[in-house]
Amino acid sequence: METRVTRRPSVTVKPPDAARANAIAQAHARSRALGLSATATPEFDALASADLRDLIDSNRTLYHQARPVMDALHAQIVDTESMVLLTDRNGVILHSLGDTDFVEKARRVALRPGVSWAERDRGTNAIGTALVEGQPTTIHANEHFLRANHILTCSCAPIADPWGRTLGALDVSGESHGFHKHTLALVRMSAQMIENHLFNTEFADAVRLQFHARAEFIGTLYEGLAAFAPDGTLLCANRSALFQLGAPLASLQQRGFDTLFGMPFAAFLQRLIQAHASTHAPFTLTLPSGVRVVARGTPGSAVEIAPVRAASSTVSAERIGRTERIERTERTNAAREKPPADARPASANWQPTFADLDTGDARVAAVLERVGRVRGRDIPVLVLGRTGTGKEWLARALHQDSPRRDAPFVALNCAALPDTLIEAELFGYEDGAFTGAKRRGSPGKILQAHGGTLFLDEIGDMPLAQQVRLMRVLQERAVVPLGGARAMPVDLRIVCATHRDLRAMIAEGSFREDLYYRINGLAVTLPPLAERTDLDALVARVLALVRREIPDAPAQIAPAVRACFRRCRWPGNLRQLANVLRTAAIMAEGEDLIDIAHLPEDLLHDCEQIDLAQADDPATAQASAPDESPARLADWQARLIDDTLTRHGGNVSAAARELGLARNTVYRHLRRR
């Protein structure tokens, strides 16, 4: 049955809770910091028609996928003196759809295409604040910073691409007396519908899987969506799929299809093709948690022709086509690189600054101080450090705190591309540069970064031939795409990163010395997480980011978890910490604390054993570890709870307080004994 929001002449709005009040207060503080005045009359400059058409064209995929959803949403709120708005990632309105009696009022406050509703232009408002916070937001009446907007009530949800990067926002705005508490839920559902459409469009040629534990949810907003390359590589998964699988995308991409769904990929393809031939009949798969899900799938064009290729030994690799390899690798690398776990652990919309990265460690502070001195200068920066130490975080902060902040930040992982593809990916190519090249060619990462920052991660893995071409680009500040004859000037800042010893590579002839000195204007080294002194502050910072994505996640960790973290070797550094906290937050959603039971079991393999009876005492936790290590993290927790209960004579409340656990957790443990 269609849900329709009815018009109400007046509504009594419940007082906001403390968290919401705090969020509004922070948004107003940002508005004042931007130099806005609440009593000022805002300027309503809109883009010229030609510029608006160009902006819509640059967001055409979002625009075309959102239009039908906007029509459906408007049908649900018709006659409520409201309108539906679509914006780009910067808060500029691309399209609007509204009730006739509200359109004229909306124009008075510039709710029309071509006008920016970013916080820097309109202060606290649902569109701008939702884009800053990266989560659905309602701003009602005098919660707006500008008094001119107090007549409005607005509900907005960001729209993300399949990798979690914000593309734009969907908003419903109306007169404040027409506030309805269900509006935000409708907007969130509509935004999720757009995201699912974007996912299916992006991976139209891939092997796609739809799944859910309940058959009636297949084909709805709540289904899990996953896309695979023909070789079984997981390309991407939507939010529902990540939730059902219980892990972030970066972690899932490291695991085989059989461990994710309880079936070899070849057997899955065979079943999928059979099901596809019989009108998409559903079948059953098993998740790592043991939950059985109903699934449907689409083989994708690459799989449909795969048996023909496999059956013919005369089909050469060259005939498969260089373009197919490029496009498949582009999709795979996009899934691996966007967003990297160490760069944006929980909020794809989060852009770090130097202040964000300065969490109390002296070595990191020294790095930030050195890099900060060159942020407005044309000096290349080389960031050294182990994998996952936050090299891209630093590069993004350097970009964000520089005069180039409004220009693109473009990242390329040189280790993620085969030698044959990195040239086209980095330098671009013209139409017809090689057999099957994309029509109109491809600009390449260097040209995409024009005016901004180009971040080359794992520069030590770049092939020698491409090192020569990169050296020429850096010298001449111009790039010639493959198949092109004209050099295109580029203005960009270069930031490179690697975990390798480049000087040793120079000595053995695998890295060019001239390129090394060209990219090494300033070299800095980030310490591994295990050597940092700001672990508690980092945990708090990452957990705050996680809670932007998972609002019901706990805001704190139990003392036992903190003791565990202090004894962890953290071989994966910040990337590992971010993944651990995100997974634990999902497992602990709705509870007061993240405790030991919520941590991934394999974390114990990276931790030194501690005195379990004293794990909650930070001082005592530094004592020597016992000789025996339990085989599983669950054993560790069980022994910790048992010892604590014994000390308190079986008093569950006292034991729970000491451990920082919920009493229900202790009771569950007792029932399992």
Image (cartoon, rainbow, N blue to C red):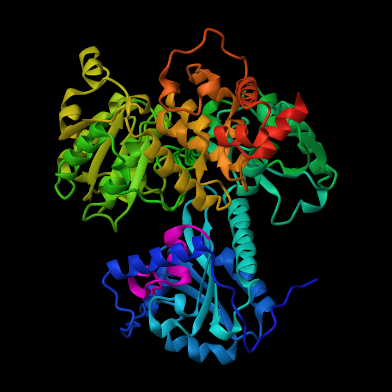
Residue, far top: 627
* Residue 237, image x, y percentages: 60, 43
State which quarter of the image contains the C terminus. top right
Task: Tell me what residue is drawn at x 25 percent, y 39 percent.
Answer: 495
Question: Is residue 110 among the parts visible in the rendering?
Answer: no
Q: Is residue 45 left or right of residue 15?
A: left
Q: Is residue 543 above or below residue 288?
A: below
User: Is 123 a magenta residue?
Assistant: yes
Q: Which residues fall within the magenta stretch?
A: 116-135
Q: Between 659 and 218, which is closer to the camera in this rendering?
A: 659
Count of all numbered marks drawn on residues in the image: 0
Q: Where residue 114 sits in the image (x, y, percent)?
A: 41, 76
Residue in the image at 82% along x and 48% along y = 215
* Residue 643 magenta-highlighted: no
Residue 382 at x, y = what percent?
A: 23, 33
* Quadrant in the picture for residue 416: top left
The foreground one among 433 and 191 is 191
Magenta stretch, main secondary structure, is helix
Residue at x 43%, y 89% (from the top left corner)? 108
Foreground residue among 479 and 361: 361
Q: Image check: 439 left or right of 513?
A: right
Tell me, yes or no, if residue 622 can be seen here: yes
Q: As displayed, is residue 203 above or below residue 539?
A: below
Along the horizontal axis of the image, is 112 left or right of 47?
right
Above or below 319: residue 640: above
Q: Nearer the viewer, residue 496 or 547?
A: 547
Answer with left or right where residue 305 lies relative to residue 343.
Answer: right
Q: Is residue 499 above or below residue 518?
A: above
